[in-house]
Image: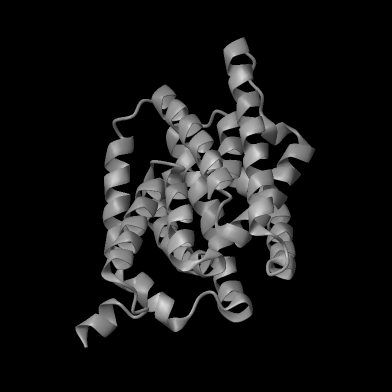
């Protein structure tokens, strides 16, 4: 009886604990250690398969967004959310329509190359003393919103794209985290019924597994918030740059 409650998907206990670890990692990511949650995408995809893993991961992301918003909501820059949201919704809609037709591998490769190219641009400008701001370009704002919406629906993999956008604006650490939290919370809540009713990648059983593992997301969020409080602003920027680069590489080899 207890096993049916704790393990509704009847997976091996090794898979169960790996999933628990992914829940903890996403709590870390959402509350401060931005980007580290990308590590869980290839792990869950290996354990459960592509579309199924997206449905398992999504509720963890929603829980993490709520925890992060509790800590950083006062620092949210709503103007950036409003600018990107319409484009992101269009990207989500396209992903829903073609999600079962497009090759996940091809899209991930294109997205990873685009992220690395943009990241290289930011680094070059940093070294040269120039300060690009992607938000001042209508094209880059639209591209970020649309590609981020598409990527988040296909594989919950929009983090590096949006983080890079915020990074280019040199937002203070708490504003960076708060703006990301509310933006992804809105998108992730929109995605839940789409995964449940259209793709059927979220089921009552996967939701039960998610709720069983909420404590891991919570402890991850608390741990991430504590760690990030010790990271200085410039150190946080370097950390995000490194994690974005590693995330893009993970998308290439996933």
Given residues 125 and 79, the one toward you in this image is: 125
Q: Is residue 235 left or right of residue 167?
A: left
Q: Quadrant of residue 131?
A: top right
Residue at the top extreme of this rendering: 128
Q: Is residue 198 left or right of residue 33?
A: right
Q: Is residue 89 above or below residue 192?
A: above
The image position of residue 162, as x and y in percent, is 59, 43
Residue at the bottom extreme of this rendering: 1
Q: Quadrant of residue 66?
A: bottom left
Figure disc tally: 0
Q: Is residue 78 above or below residue 173?
A: below
Quadrant location of the N terminus? bottom left
Q: Is residue 3 visible?
A: yes
Given residues 44 and 148, the one toward you in this image is: 44
The coloring applied to the image is one colour
Q: Quadrant of residue 165?
A: top right
Q: Is residue 73 visible?
A: no
At x 53%, y 50%, the residue is: 254
At x 28%, y 63%, the residue is: 17
Residue at the left extreme of this rendering: 2
The image position of residue 138, as x and y in percent, is 78, 39
Q: Is residue 119 above or below residue 183?
A: above
Q: Is residue 13 left or right of residue 154?
A: left
The image position of residue 47, as x and y in percent, is 42, 64
Q: Is residue 100 above or below residue 165?
A: below
The image position of residue 240, as x and y in percent, is 47, 33
Given residues 28 and 136, the one toward you in this image is: 28
């Amino acid at each position: 009886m207890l096993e049916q409650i704790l393990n509704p998907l009847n997976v091996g206990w090794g898979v169960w604990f790996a999933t628990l670890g992914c829940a903890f990692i996403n709590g870390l990511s959402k509350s401060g250690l931005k980007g580290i949650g990308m590590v869980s995408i290839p792990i869950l995809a290996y354990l459960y398969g592509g579309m199924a893993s997206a449905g398992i991961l999504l509720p963890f992301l929603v829980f993490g967004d709520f925890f992060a918003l509790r800590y950083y909501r006062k620092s949210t820059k709503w103007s950036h959310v409003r600018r990107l949201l319409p484009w992101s919704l269009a990207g989500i809609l396209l992903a829903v329509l073609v999600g079962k037709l497009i090759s996940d591998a091809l899209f991930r490769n294109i997205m990873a190359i685009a992220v690395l190219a943009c990241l290289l641009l930011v680094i070059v400008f940093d070294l040269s003393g120039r300060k690009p701001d992607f938000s001042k370009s209508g094209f880059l704002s639209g591209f970020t919103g649309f590609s981020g919406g598409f990527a988040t629906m296909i594989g919950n993999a929009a983090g590096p794209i949006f983080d890079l956008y915020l990074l280019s604006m040199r937002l203070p650490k708490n504003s960076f985290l708060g703006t990301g939290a509310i933006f992804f919370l809105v998108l992730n809540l929109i995605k839940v019924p789409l995964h449940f009713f259209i793709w059927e990648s979220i089921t009552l059983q996967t939701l039960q597994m998610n709720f069983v593992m909420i404590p891991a997301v919570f402890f991850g969020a608390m741990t991430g918030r504590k760690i990030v409080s010790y990271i200085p602003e410039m150190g946080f920027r370097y950390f995000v740059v490194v994690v974005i680069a590693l995330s893009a590489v993970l998308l290439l080899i996933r």
